[in-house]
Amino acid sequence: MLVTAPRMLADEAVPRAWGMAMAALLASLLNSGCAAVLPTGPPLPRDVQERSTQIAVHGGRLTLHLASQQTPASASLPLVLYASGDGGWFGAAVGMFHTIAAGGYPTVGFSSKELMHLEHQQFKPFGVAQVAEASSRSSSPLARPSGCRRTRRSS
């Protein structure tokens, strides 16, 4: 038995295509508007200073965001190292950084996305061939599939 889709008349195709285009436009407008309204957290108290600096990492520059109270922090307070999510340094990531700093903790933050970009420029991901080669050079039985024996080549 052959089942076919019902034929659409030409006058039905135009309103349907128009409706789909409008739905796509509305979805893209709503999606792009979300980034603009993400919370950035509470404003920092007046006694908390925030600044940014850059450090060299793998030949590139990574921005560090620093926040601390103007008065020296207690030695019992930990230094909080905060890494943003994979989206980068904006919106909720900045809000969380501000929330931690507003709690009185000396805080250093950075963009995980920016760091991963620098890492990927320096180091190329392993492919199957590299993993197989590394496994074949290993003397550990855990690095070889079960049942495979390491054989010695005679010189």
Image: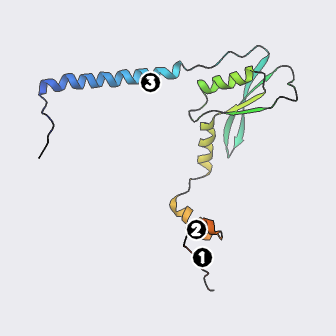
Check the image and report above or below for 17 versus 134: above
Residue at 75% across, 21% down:
103
Check the image and report above or below for 145 versus 3: below
Q: Which residue is mark 1?
A: 150
Identity, as a three-letter code, of the amino acid under mark 3 = Asn
User: Gap in Å between the C-alphas at discs 3 and 1?
Assistant: 55 Å
Residue at 14% across, 42% down:
3
Q: Residues within 10 Å of mark 3 (few under 14, many from 20)?
A: few
* Residue 124 in the image, given as x and y percentages of width and height: 57, 53
**Are the residues flagged by discs 2 and 1 in contact, CB closer than 8 Å?**
yes
The answer to which image quadrant residue 78 occupies is top right
Colour option used: rainbow
Residue at disc 1, secondary structure: loop
Give the mark toward the camera: 3 or 1.
1
Residue at 74% across, 19% down:
102
Give the number of callouts.
3
Q: Which mark is residue 50?
A: none
User: Gap in Å between the C-alphas at discs 3 and 2?
Assistant: 47 Å
* Residue 20 in the image, given as x and y percentages of width and height: 28, 25
Q: Which mark is residue 144?
A: 2
Which numbered disc, 3 or 1, marks the residue that appears first in the sequence? 3
The answer to which image quadrant residue 53 occupies is top right
* Residue 88 in the image, given as x and y percentages of width and height: 59, 32
Identity, as a three-letter code, of the amino acid under mark 2 = Arg
Q: Residues within 10 Å of mark 1 (few under 14, many from 20)?
A: few
Identity, as a three-letter code, of the amino acid under mark 1 = Arg
Check the image and report above or below for 129 versus 49: below
Is 19 on the left-hand or right-hand side of 101?
A: left
The answer to which image quadrant residue 10 occupies is top left
Q: Which residue is mark 3?
A: 31
